[in-house]
Image (cartoon, helix red, strand yellow):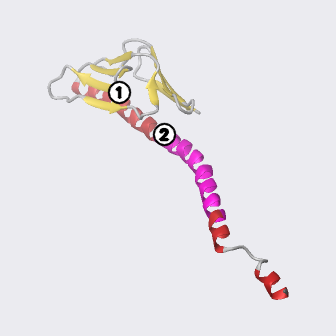
Amino acid sequence: MTQHQNARQGYTLVELLIILVVMSFLMILILRVPYDRIESETSGRLFLTELDSTIKYAQEVSILHQVKVDIHFDRWNDQIVIYSNSSDLRQNILPLPNEWQIAQEALITYNPNGRVRNYQRVVLQNSEFGSRIDLNFQLGSGRYSLNYTK
């Protein structure tokens, strides 16, 4: 009888497999949630860098080619469009990442001297995690401030 009791002290293979499946499922759930947030923040930061480069490019084009360059923050198509009346400049389109939205339609115009025609404030929002990007274009200069908040 002692030999039979010793055999029942451990877990069966099926019990161990069930525990492993449950633990694996819990680990997947726990690790997946922060990964989505990290991925969203990383794409937001990459978009921020690309947006900064795009705005600087628009200003440089206006100065170098002595043409008016427009940056259209298109709320309905979720994209930023840079265009000019000059025939030798192509139109650039910067699509927004899926979770980002433009809060209000805006048109920024760089004059041929690289200065902004009027003051504009543009807000981009991340609907999923509440992050936002604030762009403030200063009147009479080509300067702008770009702030990313979580």
- Front in this rendered view, residue 148 or 78: 78
Q: Position of residue 3 (x, y in %)?
A: 81, 88
Tell me the CA gap for discs 1 and 2.
Answer: 16 Å
Please state the extent of the stretch shown in magenta in the rendering.
19-44
What is the chief secondary structure element of the magenta stretch?
A: helix
Say which quadrant the C terminus sits in: top right
Look at 29% across and 25% down and name the residue there: 82
Name the residue type under label 1.
Gln
Q: Position of residue 54 (x, y in %)?
A: 35, 32
From this view, report whether residue 58 is shown above or below residue 8.
above
Q: Is residue 20 magenta?
A: yes
- On the picture, is 44 further left or further right than 4? left
Q: Which is more N-terminal, label 2 or label 1?
A: 2
Q: Residue furthest left?
A: 87
- Front in this rendered view, residue 66 or 48: 48
Task: For mark 1, give the secondary structure.
Answer: strand
Q: Quadrant of residue 10?
A: bottom right
Look at 65% across and 59% down and name the residue there: 23
* Any part of residue 57 in sight: no
Q: Residues within 10 Å of mark 1 (few under 14, many from 20)?
A: some
Say which quadrant the N terminus sits in: bottom right
Task: For mark 2, give the secondary structure.
Answer: helix
From this view, report whether residue 47 is shown above or below residue 140.
below
Q: What residue is pinned by disc 1?
A: 79
Q: What residue is pinned by disc 2?
A: 45
Q: Which mark is residue 101?
A: none
Q: Position of residue 129 (x, y in %)?
A: 56, 33
From this view, report whether residue 30 is shown above or below residue 131.
below
